[in-house]
Image (spheres, rainbow, N blue to C red):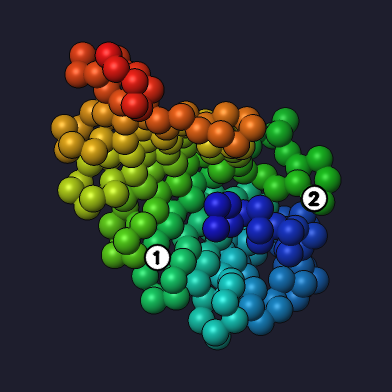
């Protein structure tokens, strides 16, 4: 799931909007639906965490850590094996950026890490701007360093660069056009790229 906050907010935002009312039982009951379980600070009454059972198997597999109505980070078990596979980090909003309505959430996704091999080890790193993915790096071989680089523009994949030789540098680039077409470029050996199939 690309952004757990957007998903969970669609279900519980009304309760989060009034969670600052410490001691009020109404938002707590609104959140407690079985699959969604909130946790509150014993002293302040502020919302601290939302646990969610996404696959309805009776076990929580997603956790959103909160400071009242402010989302801080999320942890997700993507394959249901009890091990966290994805970590999302949210930027704290300033007071001027408070939610404008009950449909808005405080905090935008800023970065995420993911264990793509479901082994608990991070192998993909994502960067977001204004809550939208702009770039990602991934270790597809398990050798401990990125060998795939993605560039995103306006919510669409614009370019993928690949290291197919293990040098730590990209030697292939795939460019994606708005019409859905793509073009493969290869390194000529001097750091420049040419379309695949053409002569230097």
Disc 2 packing (10 Å; few <14; some 14–19; many ≥20):
few
Give the alpha-carbon distance from disc 2 to disc 1, as whole Å: 28 Å
Q: Position of residue 51 (x, y in %)?
A: 56, 70
Residue furthest to the bottom: 58
Q: Closer to the camera, 70 or 118? A: 118
Expressed as whole percent of the image width and height from the top left, the position of residue 20 reads: 72, 55
Position in image of residue 184 (x %, y %): 40, 30
Q: Residue at x 24, y 18 (%)?
A: 188
Residue 66 seen in render: no
Q: Is residue 176 left or right of residue 193?
A: right
Q: Is there any visible trace of residue 34 in the rendered image?
A: yes
Residue indicated by mark 1: 84
Q: Quadrant of residue 121?
A: bottom left
Q: Earlier in the sequence, mark 2 or mark 1?
A: 1
Observer-nearest of 38 and 168: 168
Residue at the location (29% across, 65% down)?
A: 119
Residue 103's label in the rendered image is 2
Does dot 1 land on a helix, a strand or a loop?
Answer: loop
Q: Nearer the viewer, residue 127 or 24?
A: 127
> What is the quadrant of residue 172 in the picture?
top left
Which quadrant of the rendered structure holds the C terminus? top left
In the displayed structure, 128 sits above or below 120; it is above
Label 2: state its secondary structure: loop
Q: Relative to residue 21, is residue 108 depicted above or below?
A: above
Q: Residue at x 50, y 72 (%)?
A: 61
């Amino acid at each position: 799931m690309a952004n757990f906050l957007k998903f969970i907010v669609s279900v519980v935002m009304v309760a989060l909007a009034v969670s600052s009312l410490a001691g009020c039982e109404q938002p707590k009951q609104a959140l407690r639906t079985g699959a969604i379980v909130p946790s509150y600070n014993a002293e302040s009454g502020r919302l601290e965490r939302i646990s969610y059972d996404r696959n309805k198997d009776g076990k929580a597999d997603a956790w959103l850590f909160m400071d009242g109505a402010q989302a801080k980070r999320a942890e997700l078990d993507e394959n249901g094996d009890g091990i966290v596979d994805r970590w999302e980090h949210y930027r704290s909003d300033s007071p001027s950026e408070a939610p404008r309505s009950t449909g808005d959430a405080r905090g935008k996704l800023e970065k995420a890490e993911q264990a793509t091999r479901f082994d608990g080890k991070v192998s993909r790193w994502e960067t977001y701007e204004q809550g939208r993915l702009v770039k990602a790096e991934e270790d597809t071989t398990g050798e401990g360093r990125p060998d795939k680089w993605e560039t995103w523009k306006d919510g669409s994949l614009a370019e993928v660069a690949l290291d197919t030789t293990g040098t730590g540098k990209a030697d292939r680039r795939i460019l994606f056009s708005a019409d859905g077409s793509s073009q493969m470029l290869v390194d000529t050996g001097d750091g420049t790229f040419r379309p695949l199939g053409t002569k230097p």
